[in-house]
Amino acid sequence: MRRATGILVVILIGIVLVLGFTAYMGVFSKVAVNEVKTGPYTYAYMSFVGPYDKTGAVFNRVHQSLERDGIKTQKALGVYYDDPKSVPPNKQRSDCGWVLEASDFGKLPKLLEKYSIRTLPAKDRVTAVFPLRNSFSYMVG
């Protein structure tokens, strides 16, 4: 009887831990999609052609490279040009980058040697907001 109770307690603890982790990751959160005025955003990016589900590695590469260049940024910005329902995955085009803070604008000439830089003007855009905890959050969202 004690053994069965111990096993039941371990199972219950495991379930609570899994539920807690999934709640933390946002599994029970809704993706908030709204049209709001955003920008302007100046961002450093790399273009990518390939399946949209492979852009995570490009975002990571750009972020790590910016950090090595002394740029601290926390806002990713992706521009996806093609409808994945009508364009084959190997031909899907996107720009994967990170928003630069105004304090880093003095470094733009140096950054232009390594990255493409673009400014998106302020305007109404459709945005999606979801809790970002780690790279697993993208899959959960």
Image: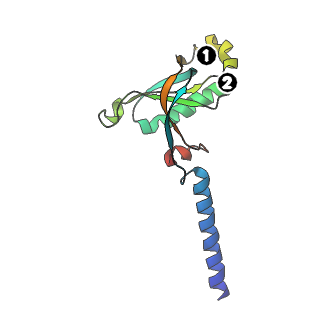
Percent x, y of residue 61: 56, 31
Q: Residue at x 62, y 78 (%)?
A: 7
Determine which residue is flagged by label 1.
111
Residue contact between numbered discs 2 and 1, judged by CB atoms under 8 Å: yes
Nearer to us in this view, 93 or 69: 93
Percent x, y of residue 100: 62, 22
Of the residues shown, which amino acid type is indicated by label 2?
A: Ile
* Distance between the alpha carbons at the discs numbered 2 and 1: 10 Å
Q: How many marks?
A: 2
The numbered dot on residue 71 is 2
Percent x, y of residue 54: 45, 37
Q: Quick one: which residue is furthest to the top in this view?
A: 109
Nearer to us in this view, 132 or 127: 127
Q: Quick one: which residue is furthest to the left in this view?
A: 86
Precedes in sequence: disc 2 or disc 1: 2
Quarter holding residue 76: top right
Q: Residue at x 61, y 26 (%)?
A: 65
Which image quadrant: the N terminus? Answer: bottom right
Q: Residue at x 59, y 51 (%)?
A: 25
Q: Secondary structure at mark 1?
A: helix
Q: Secondary structure at mark 2?
A: loop
Say few, some or many: other residues with alpha carbon within 10 Å of mark 1 (under 14 / 14 to 19 / 20 or more).
some
Percent x, y of residue 11: 60, 73
Q: Residue at x 54, y 20 (%)?
A: 122
Of the residues shown, which amino acid type is indicated by label 1?
A: Leu
Q: Is residue 37 left or right of residue 94?
A: right
The numbered dot on residue 92 is none
Nearer to us in this view, 50 or 24: 24
Say few, some or many: other residues with alpha carbon within 10 Å of mark 2 (under 14 / 14 to 19 / 20 or more).
some
